[in-house]
Amino acid sequence: MKTPICDLCARTSALCSGCEEKLKGGKISDMDVTVSRLLHKLGETYNLSAADFYKAIDLERVVLILTHGDVGILIGREGKVVAEISTAVGKKVRIAEVSGDMRKTVSDIVMPARVLGINKVYKDGKEAYKVRFAKSELKQLPMDMGTLEKAMKQLFEADVVVAFE
């Protein structure tokens, strides 16, 4: 299983100097460490050896877990793995695959709502993204607008504007 922290740190309650440096430098967050340790513990019960956990984004009421590869591994049969993660962190959990295709990644996050498009726009000489949804999809979004924009900003590492047309 791949995680943002090393295998030794995932098994123990302390971080090695390399992982501590990543945490202090902002490359990983406390939630990344928590989820990595939790997945390592769950790996003893479930077959998570092929899981590729990339990042966890804490969005107050929801934790967004990003993975490279198959999302189904972290969901588990009948959703058991994601249910245990949700219980352990005390928040609702959404799992999405990070791929080269931004639209697919955003679609995984906002499912069942559908994305109309993602446009690259330039505001004040800076690059930003405009994620467009149909007005009828507003009720189907799994999170509120502020939380969604915060998630997109952390995901794209750029300014994001969510628009309904």
Image (cartoon, grey):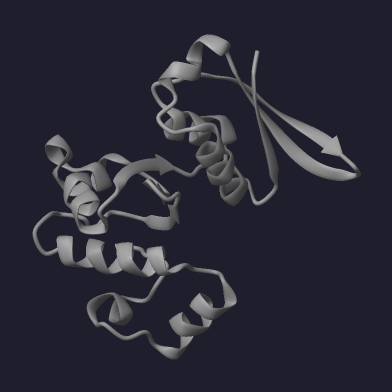
Q: Is residue 82 above or below residue 104?
A: below
Residue at point 44%, 80% (across, down): 19
Judge left or right: residue 32 versus residue 40: right
Residue sitting nearer the eye, 51 or 15: 15
Residue sitting nearer the eye, 1 or 160: 160
Q: How many marks?
A: 0
Q: Position of residue 27 (x, y in %)?
A: 55, 69
Judge left or right: residue 15 versus residue 152: left
Judge left or right: residue 14 versus residue 123: left
Q: Residue furthest top?
A: 136
Q: Position of residue 32 (x, y in %)?
A: 40, 64
Q: Position of residue 129 (x, y in %)?
A: 71, 36
Residue at point 21%, 58% (across, down): 88
Q: Position of residue 163 (x, y in %)?
A: 65, 23
**In which quadrant will I find the C terminus?**
top right
Residue sitting nearer the eye, 21 or 161: 161
Q: Residue furthest left?
A: 45
Q: Residue furthest right?
A: 125
Q: Is residue 91 above or below residue 8?
A: above
The picture quadrant where one finds residue 34 is: bottom left
Residue at point 17%, 51% (across, down): 84
Q: Is residue 111 above or below residue 20?
A: above
Q: Is residue 56 above or below residue 8?
A: above
Q: Residue furthest bottom?
A: 17
**In which quadrant will I find the N terminus?**
bottom left
Residue sitting nearer the eye, 30 or 61: 61
